[in-house]
Each structure stands twice: as C-alpha cells, then as structure tokens.
Image (cartoon, grey):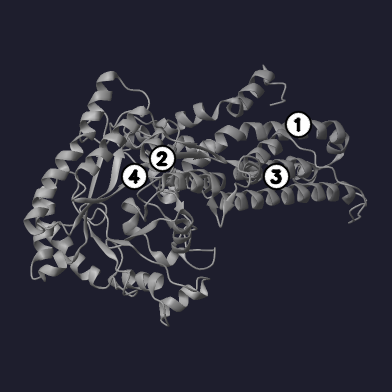
Amino acid sequence: MDSNLVKAKGVWKAVLYMPALTSVVISGTLFRLMFTEYSTGQMNKIVMALGMEPFKWLKVGWTGMAALLVLACWRWTGVNMLYFLSGLNQLIHRSMKRLRSMEQTGWQKFRYVTLPLLRPTTIYVLTISIYAGLAMFLESYMLWGETIHQRNIGLTIVGYLYKRGIEKNDMGYACAVGMVLLVIALVINIVQLILTEHLRTRRNKQWQIKKKKYVLCLTLQDIKLALCLGTGFFLILCAIIVFPDIPNVNGMRTDVVDALKEMKIPVLRWQGGCFADEYHWMDGIGPKEKKKMINTHWGGVVEDNSFGTHEFFELCRQLGCKTYVNGNLGSGTVREMSEWVEYITFNGVSPMADLRKENGHEDPWTIDYFGVGNENWGCGGNMRPEHYADEYRRYQTYVRNYAGNQPINKICCGPNVDDYEWTKKVMATCFDHCDPKLHGLMDGLSLHYYTLPETEDDWNIKGSATKFTEDIFYQTLKRGYFMEELINRHGAIMDEYDPDKNIGLIVDEWGIWSDVEPGTNPGFLYQQNTMRDALVAGMTLNIFNKHSDRVKMACIAQLINVLQSVMLTDGDKSSRMVQMRVTNS
C-alpha cells in the first residue's frame, strides 16, 4: 500500500475503510440479498452456474455462521489492515537501519524483526476484534430479522441478552448477562495493558509490572462495546429510576386494591384465558425461585410464576371477594387438579395440607367456584363436546368438598359464542346416567363472547380502541347487543335439561376486544378505553340483569391492563377507566 508503485494511496486507504463506515443496515441488507435462499441471490447464482440446486444459506447452521463471518470480515478487515499499516510505518522509521544491515532473507527479516515489533499492534487488533465479536448484534439481526430465534442460527451474545431481556421480559437475567460481559470486557482490557507493558520492558529482559496506576484508555471500539454490553447497568438503572418501589401490602398494589374495593368486586377469577390450561399450580408455590415457563399463548414471554396460589388468595382476602379458581383440564391430570383442591381447602393432616403449611399458610382457604377447564373447544384442547363432557365428568369427581358446609360450585366449560351444538351435546352428555338431583354434575355453564368493533369474526382486523368512525361506533354497540340473543338461545337449550334453572349461565369472559396499542407486545393485549367501552359495558350489564334468573355470574375480561380492563397501570402510575364508573353505579 505504501509502495512507490501504488498511485492514489489515499483513495485506496479510503476504500479499505469504507466498509466500516457503511451503515450496518445497508451492509446487512446487501448480504441478506446475496445469501437469500431464492435463485435471485448472488451466491445461489454461482451455485446454479455449477449445476447445483439453490441453497438455503441462512437456514442452515454452518452456512449461516459462514455468511455472518463473511459480513464481519468484509466490514472490519480493511480497518484492521490500516491499523497494521500504521504500525508498519512506525517500524520503518525506527528500524530501517537495522533491517538494511541484516544479511538475511526477506522472510527471515519479516519473522525475526517485523513480527516481534508488530506485537503491540497485533495485541491491540486482537483485543478490539474480540470486543467487536462480543458486541455484534445488528449484523445478525439484519441477516435474520425477527426469525433470529429459530434454532438460534446467528444468535450472538448481545442478541441473546436482547431476546431474554426485551422480548421475553426477563430483565433480571439480562442484567446478569450484561454484568458478566462487562466484567469480561474489563478483564480483556487489563490483560491487553499488562501484555503491552510486558513487551515494552522485555527489551531490558525484565518481567515485572511497574508499580503504577493503569489508565484505561478507551477507544471508539471500547465505547461501542460499553454501549452494547452495558445493557446490564442500563436495565438496573431503569429498575431503580423508572420503576421505584410502588406502595403495596404483601405484594398487592395499594392503588389497585383500593380502586377495586370501591367497585365492591364480588368475585375474582384466576387463572383466566388460554393460560389456564397450560398452568401447573405446583410451579407457583414454595420459594421465590419458582419454576419458570413460556407463556406460549400470550406474548411468548417467560412467566416466572411469582403470582401463584398464595398470592391469589391474599389478593381476594384484601378485596373481600369470593374466589373463582380455574383448573387445568387441557394439559393437566386428574391428580394435579385433585391435589390443588386439597392443597387449598383441606383442614387436617394430608400431604398437600402439610405442604401448604410448610409454605407459610396454616389455615385452608375457601374455593367458591371452580372451573373445570377453559375454552376446551379451542386453546384448552380442541375437544369435541362429547369428549369434553366425559372428561368434565371425570375431573369434577375429584374436585372434593373437603370443607363440608362450604360446597364448591363447579363450572363446566360452555360454548364459544353461538356454538349452540356445543351447549346441547355437553348438556346431554352430562345429564346422561346422572341423578336428576345432581343437575348434570355442574352448578354453572360458562359462555365467552367478545365484541369485535370492525369485523364480526376476523380476529386479524379488530379495529382501533380509540380511532373509529361513527358507523363503527354504532356497529360496535349492535354487536355488543348480540349478547342478549346468545343468552336467550343458549338458555333455551339449558331449559330442556334444567327447567328449574339450577345451573347458572356463567359469562366469565366478555367485553370489547380491539387492536393493541401501537408499540406494545401484541400478546399482552394492552388497549385503551373510551366512552364506547363504557356504553357496551353498561348495555351488557343491563342484559345480564334482565336475565338474572339464568345468568348467575359474569366476569369482565380482563381486570387490569388487558382488553376492556377497568384500570391501566404504567410503572407507579395508574388510571381508572370509564367503565369502572359504570360497574360502580
């Protein structure tokens, strides 16, 4: 590069440095197009020219990593060459006479003179290369995009930190990873300084580190690494500054509990939704280091099970409300459900009662309502009505009434909206070969219906919670009013088997379901509220009251921060939604 034969040396050096100055977005996009699995990609054109089939470069482990390596080399090889050129320029001025006086070949001069004198430069380049490898994130993200999590192809350490901390909301783990990486970076930097100092003193044949204070001189690469690996510090600061201690009693937010007390909330249902049939209650008791799981239905994030059986009954105690526990029929066992009831309600000596006492609660709690499965026609197992009804009969047998004088009201999984066939077949199966006094072995049949503002049954286009036309406004009210037809028609089927109305129609999921707020996790179902929500709530409550001979209970879905909730929270702030005033009135 410094040869007299080379013209326009500055231009060539600029060309070497250009890839490092190119935006990662641009370079990543170019390489993604080059390594695409389609025949239009440059790499596949070469493969096809050799008579082979197009290759899925980014979907196979070793070729994907090779593509990432090629991208990294393209971006940083030129910069590293300039570092070595700078080191060589210094050597030329310092060692020209020595090189000329040596009667050795060019290779021998390179090996015994040039390489030893380039050791400080080599250590520096090696150090920043390690830093760049640890800090790599955008390169892999641009190559794989949102699919980077699939089989972890192209997943870098910072990408792993991002996935755990941001996507899966596991901030504690991400903090730990960030701190470990920061320590690794400091150790590497210190090792670099020690080696450099050793090389400086080696000429005097002394192996000692002088008593001096080392100053960590941060380069641009060091700063980049600190920005990437300092995520741990950033997350910790966020936890301290953005989320200060929120007033609570035994872990329950005081502002939320006070607001719900004003509502005089009569009953609280838990677990709710599709999560109920993948929840295993043993994961939510005992030490705080509880078993974690992935909430596959909502958000795909880690559920740490910090809110379990004890916390639910503590919240109900503070609210002074009845309890509605939803059991896992879809993926759980009869024994699991039976032991949960024993754990909660048995007042005596038994394995589960003893376990409850070991976990800090001597006295049993009361289960007022127990749901045997949830939406088993769909996410709770995709069952046929006859099959679910048989399973219901079996599972409910072991929901024992240990308290004697405090019977547990058993809720059977009812229909999805207007699936009248489900209601008919479930009722017929449960009443078959059953003592009439036991009214189908159930005390309630659930019903779920959500009002979709824009489309009747397209869950991909629900409509905005706050931006809608006048036509959509009235259309939403009309669809909310559909609740009365559902109650009338399902109630008529129930009358065929239960004319005395011993079985209550339990509408335990209802409300407006609109699109989530922009920028929020789609699986968290966070939506705002307007007067439209309040009108639908008031109209629906009037319908329930009108049919109170059959509708014995109704639970809005959900309570806090999800769907048509009565409250929204953000850190230590909370806001009461307009429908809270409807339910108070």
On the image, which quarter does residue 51 sit in?
top left
Which residue is under mark 2?
566
N-terminal of the two: label 4 or label 2? Answer: 4
Which of labels 4 and 3 is toward the front?
4
Amino acid residing under circle 4: Ala
Camera sees residue 163: no
Amino acid residing under circle 1: Ser
Answer few, some or many: residues within 10 Å of disc 2's Cα (few below 14, many 20 plus, some between 14 and 19): many
N-terminal of the two: label 1 or label 2? Answer: 1
Indicate which disc residue 136 carries.
Answer: none
N-terminal of the two: label 3 or label 1? Answer: 1
Q: Contact, CB < 8 Å: mark 2 with mark 3?
A: no
CA–CA distance between discs 3 and 1? 17 Å
Which of labels 2 and 3 is toward the front?
2
Residue 430 sits above or below residue 161 on the image? below
Q: Secondary structure at mark 4?
A: loop
Quadrant of the image containing the C terminus: top left
Outermost residue, front side: 585
